[in-house]
Structures are given as C-alpha cells and as structure tokens.
Image: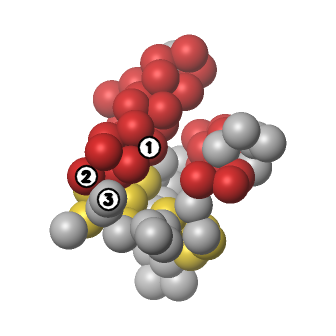
Amino acid sequence: MKLTLDLHDIYNRGGEIDRALQRIFDEAAAKKAPLIEIIPGKGSGQLKKHVLRFLDRKDIRPLYHRVEKDSKNFGRLFVHFRWK
C-alpha cells in the first residue's frame, strides 16, 4: 500500500504544505503504510527543498526509515517506513 501526496495545488502556501505533510504522516502511521510518495513537482526546486527540510526536522526524522529521490523523475520523493 502506497500513500500519495501531490503538492501542486498548494505550492505557494507554506503552512498548508506543512499541515498536508503532517496529515499524510499521521495517516501512514495509522495504516502502517510502508511507503509515501510525495510529489512536489519539478519547478524551481523550492517546494522540494521545503519538503526535505520538513523531513529533516527532529520530531519527524525518527518516524521514517529513509527518503529516496526518484532517479527518473526529479519532482518526486519516496518516504519509506519500517513498522514493528
């Protein structure tokens, strides 16, 4: 099971982006999803940097196992989980 979050619609609203990311992490924890696909899009890369900063926060980092940047599509990230 893979959860997907497309950020194209809220690309210019920082607070909403953080809330959407927090919601998808909460949903992944509730469903024990092994993977989240986050689509910040290609653009200038600012939205992807915002997402990576969110993922690097001290309260978020322990929640997931690793982040994979899609080698074929610059505008996509995968967040992998290991649930016990």
The percent coordinates of residue 29 (x first, y second) are 38, 49
The figure's colour scheme reads secondary structure
N-terminal label among 1 and 3: 1
The label on residue 25 is 1
- From where the camera sits, is residue 39 visible? no
Q: Considering only vertical position in the picture, is 17 above or below 65?
A: above
Give the number of the mark in front: 1 or 3: 3
Give the number of the mark in front: 2 or 1: 2
Q: Identify residue for label 2.
A: 31
Labels 2 & 3 near each other (Cβ < 8 A):
yes
Q: Nearer the viewer, residue 84 or 63?
A: 84
The percent coordinates of residue 40 (x first, y second) are 47, 48
Q: Which residue is at 31% across, 61% downward?
A: 33
Q: Nearer the viewer, residue 37 or 60?
A: 60
Q: Nearer the viewer, residue 53 or 48?
A: 53
Q: Identify residue for label 3.
A: 32
Picture quadrant where residue 3 is located: bottom left
Q: Which residue is at 20% across, 68% downward?
A: 1
Residue type at mark 1: give it. Phe
